[in-house]
Each structure stands twice: as C-alpha cells, then as structure tokens.
C-alpha cells in the first residue's frame, strides 16, 4: 500500500472513530456512584441497605439498568439507574403508592411522600459535567473542521518531505558542480524539473513557468487550513450567540425571581462552542505557519535548481551524464 493510501485510510478511520461520539444521543449520563460521591461531598452520611427493606418503594414499573437502596438518617430511598433519560422518564409508581419519584437525567430516586431531606436536594443539584454534547448541532461543523485540519496537515507533512520535493542526491549534485543524471526518475519536484530541462529543452521562460507550477503544487490544500483557522472560531461564536438567545428566552419561563444560577449555567454552555472552535483554530494556525515555512524552504531550493539549469543551458556548459 502506498503512503498516500495509508494517509487516506487513517483519515477515514479517524472520521469513523469520531463520528459516533459526535452523535447527540441521550445515552446514559450518570451512574449511581456519581450521586453517592455528591452525598460525600455534601457530608451526608449514607448506608447501603437491601432493596427489600421497604417493599412499598419497590413497586414501580419501567426499564431499569441498576437499582440500589440506601438510608440517610433512617430515611430509606431507592436509587434507580437507567440506560438513558427517556427510560428514566418512564419510571412510574402505582396510583395508590405512598411514594414519590424524583428524576435527574437517567437517574430516578424513589422516596416516601412528604419527605424533605438534604439528600433529595443533592440529587436534584447533580449536574452533568460539560462535554461536547452541550455544543448542540454546532459540534458537527466543528468536527468537520477538525478532521479537515488533521487530514491536510498529515498529507502535507508527507508530501513536503525532501524525498518528494528536493532529494539529497540533487542537492549533492548541485553543490559538487555535477549536473544531474539523465537516468534520474521523476519521483520528486526537483527531478521533474531536471527531466523537463534535459529531455524537452524548453526556453528559459518555459522552464521558469514549469518551476512555478511545481512550487504552486507544494501549497496544495493549505488554503483549507486558512479556512479552518477562520471558520472554526466563527462557528463557535455562532453557537455562543445561539446559546445566549436560548438562555434569555427561557429565563422568564423559569418562574424564579433570581435567575443568576440559570444564567451562569447557560453562559457556560454557550461559551463551550467558542472554546471548541478556538481549540481547533489555534493548532490549525500553528500547523499552517509550520507548513508555510517548509514550503518556502522547498521553493527556495527549487528556485536555486532552476537558476542553475538556466545558467548551464544559457552558457552551453551543461554536460549531462549518460
């Protein structure tokens, strides 16, 4: 398999491996231990008890992944872990049940009615950590920018290596004053220029034009990195603006006189897309600057080669080896 084929397959593998993670599904968010850790942080002492300790709490319907019973200050409750939020919402109690259910994402907490305890407040305050899922639909164009930047940088690093642009044997021949061999292949840009100069015997202008074509080919795809550098932060800002609009539109509906907490949470989620956009753009900018420097170095070498060929042909001093 050719190296270019390996690069393409690697990029496809990267795309397939990242794409499933970018699907904004509602799979499991919390595990039971997350809630227990929150109780420990709030200095609430709990003990694990058998689920059968209070049969009335066990009378519920719905799909359950895992369930455990605990006691806090002699108050028993059952904690249910579901596969996703939708299944958590399907947890139902009997109509005549003396219990009530609290839900938080994919977790459900069942406790007797009328109970007001600190562990219920801790359960309701349990929040999912910030992740790519809060970026909404904007994660898709941002992921496309990331994959494009990785592919272009990887492909250019391979294509700009000396063996494909200005091999050491060409540099050695020029430094020693020996003109290139006619048997050289056309694997690199320098060898292709030499092949044109030897076999096609072009005019000076034609040879310079062909040399410029080879230099232009070195810059192939670099403009896409410039697009990523400019587009990723703008997409992030668009996501931020959209998130802020949603925050301000939902605050009056919250029914709270003080919406500071809701506002701060909304701002954090809205700024997430900007953080992701900048996290993509900054490495892409560094990679673009690095590639431009390599292109300039390779272009200077090809200009040197072209000048030596023109000088040799113009003064009739070329004596190519057979």
Image (cartoon, grey):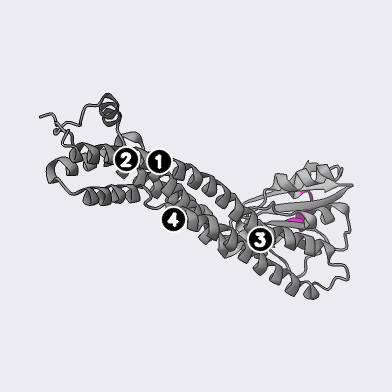
Q: Label 2, on which residue?
A: 302
**Of the image marks 4 and 1, the number of the one nearer the N terminus:** 1
Image quadrant where one finds the N terminus: top left
The Cα atoms of the two marked residues, 2 and 4, are separated by 21 Å
Image quadrant where one finds the C terminus: top left
The nearer-to-camera label among 2 and 3 is 2
Do the residues under discs 2 and 3 have CB atoms within 8 angstroms?
no
Q: Label 4, on which residue?
A: 223
Q: Is residue 213 left or right of residue 122?
A: left
Q: Label 1, on which residue?
A: 157
Percent coordinates x, y for residue 253 in the rendering: 78, 75
Percent coordinates x, y for residue 20 in the rendering: 49, 54
26 above or below 154? below
Residue 108 appears in the picture as rendered: yes
Q: Give the residue at x 19% y 41%.
A: 314
The nearer-to-camera label among 3 and 4 is 4
The nearer-to-camera label among 2 and 4 is 2
89 above or below 30? below
Q: Quadrant of residue 315?
A: top left
The Cα atoms of the two marked residues, 1 and 2, are separated by 18 Å
Q: Which residues are magenta?
A: 53-58
Do the residues under discs 1 and 3 have CB atoms within 8 angstroms?
no
The nearer-to-camera label among 1 and 3 is 1
238 above or below 187? below
């Amino acid at each position: 398999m050719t190296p270019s084929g390996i690069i393409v397959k690697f990029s496809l593998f990267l795309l397939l491996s990242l794409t499933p993670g970018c699907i904004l599904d509602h799979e499991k968010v919390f595990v039971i231990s997350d809630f227990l850790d929150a109780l420990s942080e709030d200095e609430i002492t709990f003990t694990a008890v058998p689920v059968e300790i209070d049969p009335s709490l066990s009378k519920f319907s719905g799909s359950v992944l895992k369930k455990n019973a605990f006691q806090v200050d002699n108050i028993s409750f059952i904690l249910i872990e579901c596969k996703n939020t939708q299944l958590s919402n399907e947890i139902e109690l009997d109509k005549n049940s003396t219990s009530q259910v609290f839900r938080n994402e994919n977790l459900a907490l069942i406790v007797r009615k009328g109970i007001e305890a600190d562990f219920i407040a801790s359960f309701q305050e349990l929040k999912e950590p910030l992740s790519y899922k809060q970026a909404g639909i904007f994660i898709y164009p941002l992921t496309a920018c990331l994959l494009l930047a990785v592919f272009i940088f990887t492909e250019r690093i391979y294509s700009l290596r000396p063996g494909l642009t200005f091999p050491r044997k060409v540099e050695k021949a020029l430094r020693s004053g020996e003109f290139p061999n006619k048997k050289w292949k056309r694997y690199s840009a320098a060898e292709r220029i030499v092949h044109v100069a030897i076999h096609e015997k072009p005019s000076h202008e034609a040879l310079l034009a062909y040399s410029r074509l080879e230099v232009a080919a070195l810059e192939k795809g670099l403009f896409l990195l410039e697009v990523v550098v400019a587009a990723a932060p703008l997409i992030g800002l668009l996501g931020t603006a959209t998130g802020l609009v949603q925050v301000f539109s939902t605050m009056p509906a919250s029914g709270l006189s003080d919406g500071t907490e809701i506002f701060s949470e909304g701002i954090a989620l809205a700024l997430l897309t900007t953080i992701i956009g900048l996290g993509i753009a900054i490495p892409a900018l560094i990679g673009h600057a690095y590639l431009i420097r390599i292109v300039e170095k390779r272009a200077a070498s090809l200009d040197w080669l072209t000048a030596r060929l023109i000088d040799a042909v113009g003064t009739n001093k070329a004596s190519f080896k057979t």
